[in-house]
Amino acid sequence: MNSICCSVCNEPIENNQGTYRIKGTGVIFARGLDVSTILYAHWGECGKILDKYLDQFPPEQQGDEWFCGHLPFRLQPDEETTNLDEFIYVLKSGKHYKIGITKDVKKRMGELKTGDPIKHLFVCSSFFENAGKFEKRLHEAFNDYRGQGEWFELPAEKLEELINILENGDFMDKVLPLDNVVYYHPGTRVLWRNRPGIVHSLVIKTYKYQVGYNILLDTQSSTDEPKVLNSSYGELVLEDSGIPSQEGYEV
């Protein structure tokens, strides 16, 4: 597999010790992403330089927003696969979302765009063994929201649930998440997309072992309400170390 190079220093990013930036629209869990432009940066100084560069562009030039996350970010398989091993992907078109399977997400998006004036935006994807079987389970689970074929009209909370199922690789029991979970506590100093602030409060996600974060940025003129709402763990690092903590299920 080809190494990912940092968009700032042009040096390889080893062992996924970096972040990606990708243009998209909407809030974090209702995003549609344009996979034609993906920027990468090492943790730390390169990430700060890249964010400063992107901040200089007004929205109409920059795109609606640049989303940030920790590597890896995969759209194509990185090893030999069987005929049953494929990506399950979610695409956005207007208010509808397509749940489909493919060997190559980027190629599939190109095929969908051919002769179709409607823009399809990438939401997320995950690689599965026997993907067709799991795709069928997803279609059944969200059948109440089905439009035509593989297209679903998902409210925000159901889209978030779908994304988390794909990120975890399986359906999760609906349980309270805080008993055995490592997470950032309110008051913790963090960097959100390399911008300093503190964790103001948590968003409890009852269907998985995780929480969301409401962040008060240091640059806010008012400290009454957080500017950043329901941020994902992937957008945060601890301010003192500059690297992600080990959030997740603690056995």
Image (cartoon, rainbow, N blue to C red):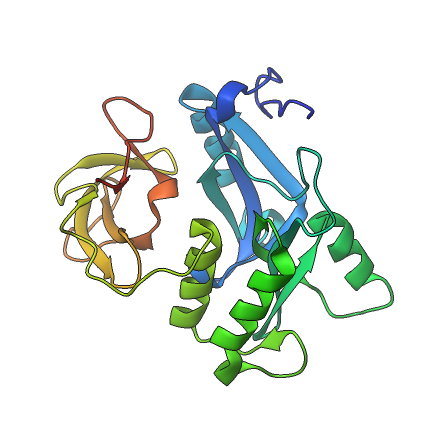
Percent x, y for residue 246? 28, 33
The residue most toward the right is 115
| Quarter in which the C terminus is drawn | top left
Percent x, y for residue 232? 35, 49
Going by the image, does 227 lie left or right of 24?
left
Going by the image, does 99 lie left or right of 51?
right
Front residue of this view, candidates 169 and 98: 169
Residue beneath the point at 48% across and 39% down: 55
Front residue of this view, candidates 178 and 251: 251
Whether residue 139 appears in this view of the structure is yes
> Could you say which quadrant of the image residue 207 lies in?
bottom left
| Quarter in which the N terminus is drawn | top right
> Please, is residue 159 above or below residue 200 in the view?
below
Front residue of this view, candidates 55 and 23: 23
Residue beneath the point at 60% across and 63% down: 133
Going by the image, does 88 lie left or right of 231?
right
> Please, is residue 38 above or below residue 14 in the view?
below
